[in-house]
């Protein structure tokens, strides 16, 4: 499987990092070794001094697809989850300034914790899923999918023009404003609507 991540998909987050709004979905990949499942612990890597959480709605692909039309994209997933796209912000800034790829900042081992629970898409209003992240019991991020620049179906359609989607692939659909650093001892808890989906302690 592969992990496809969308960057700058919420205007408020693009603004907080001083990025222009994209004209088409900006995506990058993480390898399967970036996935962290069934763990309540995340170990802070030692190569960064500024590791940021980015809480994101995650779509799990359940059919193989290529060149998927947007109007058929919803046939390619039936569950919605929540994950964290951990980012070494200091390294990412360095890469951006030098025009280099982001993998060192984004694709490292266990950089993508995924919540244990997925919700059937029928149980959600896909165009307006609300999600939130708490750090040490204080809400730090709140997002609503209606504020995505590119919808889930548009993302699937766009990415599948370039890359075949396969069963089990995960799409991290971008983060809203409020990203910030974590340190050892922090607790992160993420919700979709009122359901707790992910819980992590930084070790
Ligand atoms: Mg992200």
Image (cartoon, rainbow, N blue to C red):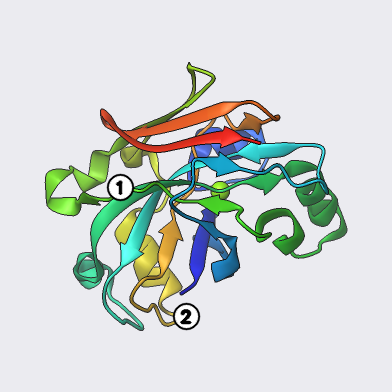
The location of residue 3, given as percent across then percent down, is 50, 65
Asked whether mark 1 and ligand 1 are closer than 8 Å, the reply comes as no
Residue, disc 1:
117
State the residue at coordinates (68%, 31%). Answer: 181
Whether residue 30 is visible to the viewer of this picture, yes or no, is no
Please name whichever residue, 130 or 88, is drawn nearer the observer in this view of the structure: 88
Would you place residue 73 above or below residue 191 in this image?
below
State the residue at coordinates (65%, 60%). Answer: 109
Question: How crowded is the residue under tag 1: few (<14 C-alpha within 10 Å), some, or many (20+)?
Answer: some
Please name whichever residue, 170 or 109, is drawn nearer the observer in this view of the structure: 109
Q: CA distance from mark 1 to mark 2?
A: 26 Å
Q: Quadrant of residue 147?
A: top left
Asked whether mark 2 and ligand 1 are closer than 8 Å, the reply comes as no
State the residue at coordinates (59%, 32%). Answer: 179
Label annotation for residue 163: 2
Q: Earlier in the sequence, mark 1 or mark 2?
A: 1
Please name whichever residue, 57 or 10, is drawn nearer the observer in this view of the structure: 57
Please name whichever residue, 80 or 70, is drawn nearer the observer in this view of the structure: 80
């Amino acid at each position: 499987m592969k992990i496809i991540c969308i960057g700058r998909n919420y205007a408020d987050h693009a603004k907080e990092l001083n990025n222009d709004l994209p004209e088409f979905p900006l995506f990058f990949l993480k390898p399967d070794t970036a996935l962290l499942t069934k763990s309540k612990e995340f170990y802070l890597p030692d190569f960064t001094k500024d590791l940021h959480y980015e809480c994101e709605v995650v779509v799990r692909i359940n059919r193989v697809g290529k060149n998927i039309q947007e109007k058929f994209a919803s046939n390619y997933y039936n569950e919605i989850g929540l994950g964290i796209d951990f980012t070494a912000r200091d390294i990412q800034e360095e890469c951006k300034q030098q025009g280099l790829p982001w993998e060192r900042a984004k694709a490292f081992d266990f950089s993508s914790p995924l919540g244990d629970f997925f919700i059937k898409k029928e149980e959600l209003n896909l165009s307006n899923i609300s999600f939130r992240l708490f750090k040490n019991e204080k809400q730090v991020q709140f997002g609503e999918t209606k504020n995505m620049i590119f919808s889930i179906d548009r993302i699937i359609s766009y990415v599948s023009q370039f890359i075949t989607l396969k069963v089990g692939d995960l799409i991290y659909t971008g983060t809203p404003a409020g990203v910030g650093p974590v340190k050892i001892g922090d607790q992160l808890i993420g919700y979709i609507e009122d359901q707790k989906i992910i819980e992590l302690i930084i070790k």
